[in-house]
Image (cartoon, helix red, strand yellow):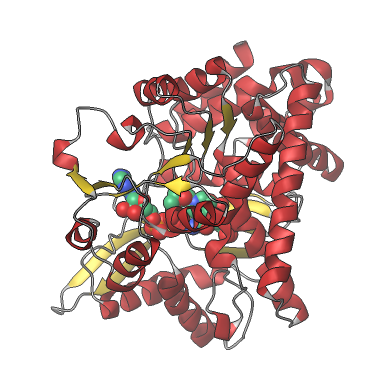
Amino acid sequence: MPYVQDTLAALRRTSPAQDEFYQAVEEILLSLRPLLDRDPRYRANNIIDRIVEPERQIMFRVTWIDDKGRIQVNKGYRIQFNSTLGPYKGGLRFHPSVNAGIIKFLGFEQIFKNALTGLPIGGAKGGANFDPKGKSDNEIMRFCQSFMTELYRHIGPTIDVPAGDIGVGMREIGYLYGQYKRLTGSYDGVLTGKGLKWGGSLVRKEATGYGAVYLAENMLRAKKESLEGRVCTVSGAGNVAIYTIEKLYQLGAIPVTASDSGGMIYHKTGINLETLKRIKEVERVSLEAYVKEHPDAVYTPVEQYPEGRNPVWSIPCEAAFPSATQNELNGEDAAELVRNGCKLVCEGANMPSTPEAIDVFLDAKIAFGPGKAANAGGVATSQLEMSQNASMHQWSFEEVDRRLREIMANIYISISETAAEFGEPGNFVLGANIAGFRKVADAMIEQGAV
Ligand SMILES: NC(=O)C1=CN([C@@H]2O[C@H](COP(=O)(O)OP(=O)(O)OC[C@H]3O[C@@H](n4cnc5c(N)ncnc54)[C@H](O)[C@@H]3O)[C@@H](O)[C@H]2O)C=CC1
Ligand SMILES: O=C(O)CCC(=O)C(=O)O
């Protein structure tokens, strides 16, 4: 397909060394062919060249002082990718692996994910190559304050509204918000994922994980199946993984794994959610601590992982929820999941499956929920937080959860109907990519050449 190769060649030339970004672009472009062939307006308006180019990229130095009084420096980023549908919206990631290409792929995915929610939000992402691991609370606070000292001039409640992602939870959002308020003097809904006492929304913490399970529920219901009694594997042990596990239990499933950057646990009788929450949300220590309290669980440190494999995906299961990070599930992992009888994969993380893994799932015709649909419940609930802030109201847990369920059900309808419309029923990668793209592209055409 020449338009795919030409676009990728141009991106490699003009934006070198951004492999994850090229991967995300290639996946979308490959899906779009039937749409582009059917409707000439997208080519006539040069939508592809425009949509892969961010509207704005901000890179800045973050200088902060550690507990020993030494001056430290990190790289900060905010990419304001596309504001066609609404104010820029997307999380902040603090992780040592962060670079311009990672932020760009995340920002690009966010455009289409946000479009799928049906809510008025554009696509953005940001972060820093800062490693929160091993840092004291005071160091995290000083870093966040310095980060916001640059970022505040680029954001606003109707301009750009950041939130959390890997390494950024309620604690970090609190420090960022405090500094924004100090610098501007205004109490704006400029961040989401805020604390419940100062403008946060109920269910935002749970929303990404709950949403992924709601999408899985919808995919299974269409096949007259359910999650009840199903053994599930989950990777990650952060915000998304924890609330995926919580919702799986609520729906009668048995989640048996969790993982962090140090290793994985396999607890055959089911992960103890209380222990997991305490270890990760309160004590903030390695998962290794889990087996001290549950000696019947097995801990495998990363040093013992087979070369190039993630052993979470070797555990037999009926449904899998990759919820840690990008490219954590490769072709071999996917083949093993399918061989072991896995019937559903729902991506809580952003782009966790490699292109080879996605091909395996689609060829096997198992239910595969791609990240931009499956994890959209997080950003959707962020938008519900923005609505509550704008109207100075706070909705109940039940009200926000009801809206989240409805949004995920609508996403399912949109991706499944679009897949069927383009002759590939059940291919939710195609369905999500075309449905998300079409919404943004149509609006771009209506807004003219800007
Ligand atoms: N927090 C949110 O609302 C949303 C998050 N996501 C995505 O979900 C994924 C997880 O994010 P959160 O749970 O928010 O982050 P988190 O920081 O709360 O947890 C991340 C988990 O993944 C593990 N992890 C991170 N990098 C890893 C690596 N290279 N190898 C192995 N394990 C690794 C960490 O140890 C941790 O357990 C990310 O891909 C993120 O972009 C997607 C939509 C919304
Ligand atoms: O809640 C948000 O604004 C963004 C969540 C996010 O970063 C994501 O969807 O990947």
Give coordinates of residue 34: x percent, y percent.
74, 17
* 403 on left or right of 107: right
* 264 on left or right of 433: left
Q: Nearer the viewer, residue 443 or 264?
A: 264
Name the residue rendered at 82%, 17% in the picture. 38
Give coordinates of residue 186: x percent, y percent.
61, 86
Name the residue rendered at 42%, 41% in the picture. 101
Q: Nearer the viewer, residue 341 or 229?
A: 229
Q: Is residue 221 above or below residue 376?
A: above
The quarter of the rendered structure image containing the N terminus is: top right
Q: Nearer the viewer, residue 226 or 95?
A: 226
Judged from this view, the residue extending furthest toward the right is: 446
Give coordinates of residue 329: x percent, y percent.
38, 32
The quarter of the rendered structure image containing the C terminus is: top right
- Could one spot residue 58 in this view of the protein? no
Q: Nearer the viewer, residue 252 or 102?
A: 252
Name the residue rendered at 14%, 40% in the picture. 303
Tally of numbered tags: 0
Judged from this view, the residue extending furthest toward the top is: 1
Give coordinates of residue 27: x percent, y percent.
56, 26
Name the quadrant containing residue 95: bottom left
* 190 on left or right of 73: right
- Could one spot residue 39 in this view of the protein? yes
